[in-house]
Amino acid sequence: MGAITTPWGMDPNESLYQASLLTKLNFARSPAKFNPPITAVNPGETWMVVRPLQRGDYDKGFLQLLGQLTSVGNCTRKQFDERFTFMKDAGGYFVTVIEDTRSQKIIGSATLTVEQKFIHNCGLRGSLEDVVVDDTYRGKQLGKLIVVTVSLLAVVLGCYKVSLNCKDTLVAYYKTLGYVLEPGNSNCMNMRFDSS
Ligand SMILES: CC(C)(COP(=O)(O)OP(=O)(O)OC[C@H]1O[C@@H](n2cnc3c(N)ncnc32)[C@H](O)[C@@H]1OP(=O)(O)O)[C@@H](O)C(=O)NCCC(=O)NCCS
C-alpha cells in the first residue's frame, strides 16, 4: 500500500521537520515550572500531541488558530502547500503545534526559525515567533509547553541563542521561561511596508 494521499495528491501526515527531534529535548534544562510536570513527549493528556506542523493541518484549524494572533489573510490550500514545500526544502523552519486529537484541531503553535550565520564560527541563531494557544485552552500550561519545546529544540539544533519580540505585558511571562532583557541591547525596531 502506498502513502495515504489527499484528493489533491499530497500526504496530509507529511511533517515539516523530523518529529524525532522532539524526543531529544531536555526539559530539566528549562527554568520553566510545570505543575504537574509535562514535556513535549508527555504533555499530560493522552489526547494531546506535540509535533511538527503537518501538511494536513490546513484542515485542522491551523490558520484559524494563527488568526487569534494576527491577520492571516486568505491563504488557499494551494498557497499553503506551496509555502509548506518551500519551508521544508529550505530547512530552518520549525513550526511546532499542539493537536487535540479528540477534535483533530490544532490548539497551540510556535515557530522556531534558524538562521545560518557567518559570525560566531558559522553559528546558528534561533528566533521564536508566532506563539499562540487557542483561547478556549489558555491557562493550562500549553503556552509554556510550546515555548519551552521550541526553545529546547533550538538547543538540540545547536543555536547559540534564541530571540523573540513581545508585548510589554508578556515580558514577565517570557522571563519565567528563561528569556532575559539584555540592558542596552534589547530594543526592537521595525520598518513596516504594508498593513499585514
Ligand atoms: C500568551 C499565550 C500563548 C499564553 O498561553 P497560555 O496557554 O494561556 O499560557 P500558560 O497556561 O502556559 O501560562 C502560564 C503562566 O503565564 C501566565 N500568563 C499567561 N498569559 C499571560 C499574559 N498574557 N500576560 C502575563 N502572564 C500571562 C499565566 O498566568 C500563568 O502563570 P502561572 O504559571 O504562574 O499560573 C496565550 O495567552 C495566547 O495565545 N495569547 C494570544 C497570542 C499572543 O499574545 N501570543 C504571544 C505573542 S509574543
Image: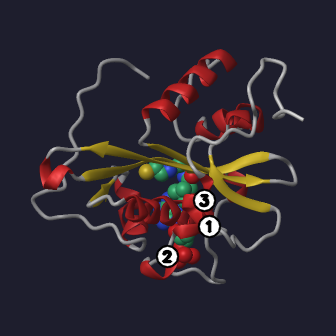
Q: Upstream in the sequence, badge 2 or badge 3?
A: 3
Q: Residue at x 22, y 53 (%)?
A: 123
Residue bearing mark 2: 26
How many numbered marks, from 0 up?
3
Q: How many other residues sit within 10 Å of disc 2, few (<14), some (14-19) or many (≥20)?
A: some
Residue 90 on image: x %, y %? 43, 32
Q: Upstream in the sequence, badge 2 or badge 1?
A: 2
The quarter of the picture where the C terminus appears is top left
Residue 189 on image: x %, y %? 20, 39
Q: CA distance from mark 2 to mark 1?
A: 10 Å
Residue type at numbered disc 1: Ala
119 in relation to 11, above or below:
below
Residue 128 on image: x %, y %? 40, 51
> Mark 3 near ligand 1 (CB under 8 Å)?
no
Image disc number at residue 137: none
Residue bearing mark 3: 20
191 in relation to 180, above or below:
above
> Residue 185 or 7: which is nearer the viewer?
7
| Residue 8 visible | yes
Residue type at numbered disc 3: Ser
Does residue 180 appear to the left or right of 106 in the view shown? left
Q: Upstream in the sequence, badge 1 or badge 3?
A: 3
Q: What SS does tag 1 mark?
A: loop
Residue type at numbered disc 2: Asn
Residue bearing mark 1: 40
Q: Residue at x 23, y 64 (%)?
A: 181
Q: CA distance from mark 1 to mark 3?
A: 11 Å
